[in-house]
Amino acid sequence: MPDSDLNNPEKTNTFSDNGTSALIDHLSIREIWDLCSKIAKMAQKELEERDGEETSGELVKLMLFNFLAKNSNPDEKEWQNMRTEINHYIQAEKEAANYENSLPTIGIEIEVPIRDSRFLKQIIAVFDGLCFYQYHPENDQNEKPELYELATHFSYSALTQAKILQELAKLGFVPLEPIPKNQNSNSAFNFRIPKDNILSLHINIGMPEKIVDSGDFSNTNFQIDLSLINQAIALAFTSPERLTNRKTAHSLAVKSDASPSKKTEDSSLKMIAKNFSRVELRAGEFRNQSTYEMLLKTQRLMAILFSRQKIAQRQKATPTEKKLASLSEILIGEVISTMAKYGYHLYDIDDATKTGIEKTIGLIRETNFAKDLKTIINKYSRKTGIILKLN
């Protein structure tokens, strides 16, 4: 997973008292635009020289922006170190994009509170210049004035999305605060997201074409499987505060607005966006380093479920997909058994009456429920990694 920059005070820029970032505070809007224009050409060159995937583009641009915003005149050694780091992520994305790799595509949506109007204008300029999709308060007068949403394009590797989150922290987009020395038992972790900042993180997983029947998707075995694993992930990695302060009524959604990837089998469908669906896991949270794990493990467990569904629909499956599918019955059985052990009912975290949510919060705080679910997730993530020959 990404290095410890999130918690390294020399590499990560924190929010100051007024919510601004030291990294871009000195830059005017014009300077930001000029830098972004320069970076677009540099990023394209990096990708072309390494025969990289276009899906690495957002990350490469963001890494270069942070690098040059911090040091406008780097020396040769600094440049070499940066290019080596960029190459590491480009190669990881290339490996994941291989058709033989059964991992589905992954993207994220993150919501962050921004209270400083000048910083908001700077952030909008950065993401406009780097061509990120963003939703900010000016678009909706009914939205809370400080809430800002950024969505990434899909990537083939969860590592790409994890590194984007880390670079957003460097940029100052993610609010961080120093950990008081008397609370810091590990000197490697010097910064944290403030407790009063609950950062919503949705995870989008691209589904193989034709995997969802054209009919009603609700109450199918596949929908129940997805809900089980989605809720297991949310319960294992999301804080009680986030679970009780969600804007969305349902923690899972399947949407038919996904973009095709190079893994699409039927080339005739690539121009028809409505043929592609994505699973949106909507109860996630950017909390700390464990969020990086969550992205990787979510992608791997979804590969198991998608392989299971392809076989259930009698679709052509690769030998790798057959091996992944063979894990699904035991995975789902262990999740169901653990939920039953603690008295958790499927969809309790989506209970509109709040009764189920309150019961769930009690389980997380007072028992080993979340820990036991995380143990299951870790086990099947490792098994998936072995099958896919991942590190």
Image (spheres, grey):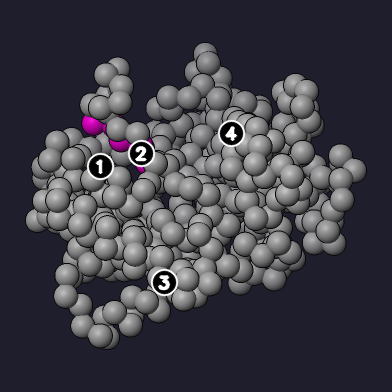
How far is the residue under mark 4 from the one under mark 2?
17 Å
How far is the residue under mark 1 from the one under mark 2?
8 Å
309 lies above or below 59 = above
State the image coordinates of residue 133 (x, y, percent, origin top left): 39, 41
357 lies above or below 262 = above
How far is the residue under mark 2 from the one under mark 3?
25 Å
Q: Residues within 10 Å of mark 1 (few under 14, many from 20)?
A: some
> Nearest the camera: 84 or 305?
84
Q: Hey, which quadrant is residue 36 in on the image?
A: bottom left
Q: Amino acid at mark 2?
A: Gln
How far is the residue under mark 4 from the one under mark 1?
25 Å
Q: Nearer the viewer, mark 2 or mark 3?
A: 3
How far is the residue under mark 1 from the one under mark 3?
25 Å
Look at the numbered discs 1 and 2 and tell me whether their residues touch, using CB distance below 8 Å: yes
* Stretch in magenta: 146-150
Secondary structure, mark 4, is loop
Q: Earlier in the sequence, mark 4 or mark 2?
A: 2
Q: Which residue shows up at 50% across the image and 59% down it? A: 54
Q: Which residue shows up at 22% across the image and 37% down it? A: 114
Q: Residues within 10 Å of mark 2 (few under 14, many from 20)?
A: some
Secondary structure, mark 1, is helix
Q: Amino acid at mark 4?
A: Asp
Query: What residue is disc 3 on?
Result: 46
Q: Nearer the viewer, mark 4 or mark 3?
A: 3
How far is the residue under mark 4 from the one under mark 3?
30 Å
Q: Amino acid at mark 1?
A: Ile
From the viewer's perspective, tell me whether residue 230 is left or right of residue 209. left
Query: What residue is disc 2 on?
Result: 134
